[in-house]
Image: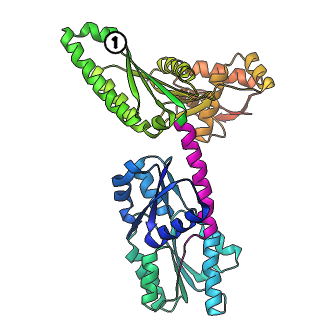
């Protein structure tokens, strides 16, 4: 059974737990209430070993956890919508018998609360908004609301923090706690269920990783004695065994600098950063580049076939790196790195394939080009830009883009001037 860690103020955690019981989910929920949101980091670090997915009552804790985990795959948070804010205004109207317009609100930095206020015709000029982030001290927010109240500028304060809410009430300020509605919590629970299903699917898929130390023959030749080579192999295997322990996998040595790891897709994806670190360590120890191919599949055979294809692609790259091929044909290059690139080499559109064939452009190269354009958010591109990201000679890229233009899969948009002397660069876009 998957274990879900719920993080938030005690009141919020208890409320979420109550709703989970009504929904009768086949999950085990572990409560982790905090007094201050800054405790989120310590909670996640100390308890991550016993939690499969972290569930946060608010986005602030989620942001903190994401920075610690370097990924959001195991994280989920309740998304506040306008409904939460409108509920506060409805409560003020019921309690004050009038639509209160002079209000102070604290809200997360990246939200667009002004748009929500415009929808209910609340004049933004009468609303004082205080933005906060992970560095904000809740006492600052308390002082902000109190000062406005004492100056007679507001009639009501709305806050996202339970502690601030209670302190404002104690000071005699009409205050309302901006918390998610039951519907928002239930919606997040449904998203959680989908996330758990995806985890289960990945954990039942086989993952095979092939790790090749390049030019291992030359490394063996350089070794002054067989003992030095054995010491090196022992250090390499020690790093790989530590990785296998985290992956809950098994290690096989195929000889001549090749190692194979058998695990599950879910375990590999959750530990991709450790895999990257291990590859860097192997490269330092062996003073060589490392090629890594990972394959996923429903069976060991299917996963190993994909892994062999992935290791071949890794070896074709100048910088090697980690290449993953999934069961659906999706390819991920430079996995775990900032320049990670994802594309598919399987296309089923007959007309499209005919155009590629006519232009003598492979599905793989077109897919990589399209993936780079998507990742960089380019409306137009030059062949020099694409050559840099594809790590190819610009002439080859220019030839490919010209072919795509001739068959109608790309088009010329214009030119841009060059800082140095020479012809301006042509700008293209994919059609």
Q: Main secondary structure of the magenta part?
A: helix
| 104 in relation to 401, above or below | below
Is residue 150 a member of the stretch shown in magenta?
A: no
Q: Quadrant of residue 409?
A: top right
Q: Position of residue 193 (x, y in %)?
A: 59, 52
| 302 in relation to 426, above or below | above
| 279 in relation to 123, above or below | above
Element class at badge 1? helix
Please identify the residue farthest to the right as the structure is shown: 351
- Total labels drawn: 1
Chain part drawn in magenta: 176-203
Q: Position of residue 353 (x, y in %)?
A: 75, 22
Q: Nearer the viewer, residue 237 or 86?
A: 237
Query: Would you say 379 lies left or right of 109 here?
Result: right
Q: Nearer the viewer, residue 364 or 394?
A: 364
Is residue 190 a member of the stretch shown in magenta?
A: yes
Q: Quadrant of residue 86?
A: bottom right
Describe the colour scheme in one phrase: rainbow
Identify residue for label 1.
216
Q: Position of residue 307 (x, y in %)?
A: 51, 22
Picture residue at 52% right of the left edge, 55% below the top: 76
The answer, for residue 186, to whether it is visible in the render is yes
Please identify the residue farthest to the top as the structure is shown: 221
Mark 1 surroundings: few (<14), some (14-19) or many (≥20) residues within 10 A: some
Q: Position of residue 269 (x, y in %)?
A: 48, 37
Query: Would you say 283 lies left or right of 393 here?
Result: left
Q: Nearer the viewer, residue 360 or 210?
A: 210
């Amino acid at each position: 059974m998957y274990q879900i860690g719920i993080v938030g103020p005690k009141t919020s955690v208890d409320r979420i737990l109550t709703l989970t019981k009504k929904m009768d989910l086949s999950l085990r929920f572990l409560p982790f209430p905090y007094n201050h949101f800054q405790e989120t980091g310590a909670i996640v670090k100390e308890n991550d070993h016993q939690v499969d997915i972290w569930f946060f009552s608010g986005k602030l804790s989620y942001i903190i956890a994401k920075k610690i985990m370097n990924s959001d795959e195991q994280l989920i948070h309740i998304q506040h919508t306008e409904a939460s804010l409108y509920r506060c205004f409805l409560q003020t109207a019921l309690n004050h018998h009038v639509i209160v317009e002079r209000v102070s609100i604290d809200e997360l930095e990246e939200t667009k609360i002004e748009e929500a206020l415009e929808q209910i015709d609340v004049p933004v000029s009468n609303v004082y908004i205080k933005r906060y982030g992970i560095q904000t001290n809740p006492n600052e927010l308390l002082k902000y609301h109190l000062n406005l109240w004492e100056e007679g500028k507001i009639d009501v304060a709305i806050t996202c923090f339970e502690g601030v809410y209670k302190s404002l009430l104690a000071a005699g300020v009409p205050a309302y706690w901006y918390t998610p509605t039951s519907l928002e919590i239930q919606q997040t629970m449904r998203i959680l269920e989908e996330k758990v299903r995806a985890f289960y699917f990945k954990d039942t898929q086989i993952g095979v990783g092939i790790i090749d130390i390049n030019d291992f023959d030359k490394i063996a030749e350089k070794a002054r004695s067989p003992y030095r080579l054995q010491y090196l192999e022992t250090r390499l295997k020690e790093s790989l065994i530590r990785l296998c322990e985290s992956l809950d996998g098994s290690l096989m040595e195929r000889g001549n600098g090749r190692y194979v790891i058998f695990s599950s897709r879910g375990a590999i994806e959750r530990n991709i950063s450790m895999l990257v670190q291990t590859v860097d360590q192997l490269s330092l120890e062996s003073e060589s580049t490392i090629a890594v191919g990972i394959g996923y599949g429903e069976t060991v055979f299917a996963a190993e076939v994909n892994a062999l294809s992935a290791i071949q692609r890794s070896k074709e790259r100048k910088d090697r790196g980690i290449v993953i091929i999934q069961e659906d044909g999706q390819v991920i290059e430079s996995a775990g790195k900032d320049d990670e690139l994802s594309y598919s080499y399987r296309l089923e559109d007959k007309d499209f394939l005919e155009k590629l064939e006519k232009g003598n452009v492979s599905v793989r190269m077109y897919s990589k080009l399209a993936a780079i354009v998507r990742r960089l958010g380019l409306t137009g591109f030059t062949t020099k830009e694409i050559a840099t990201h594809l790590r190819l000679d610009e002439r080859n890229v220019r030839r490919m883009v010209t072919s795509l233009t001739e068959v109608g899969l790309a088009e010329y948009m214009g030119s841009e001037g060059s800082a140095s002397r020479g012809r301006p660069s042509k700008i293209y876009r994919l059609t």
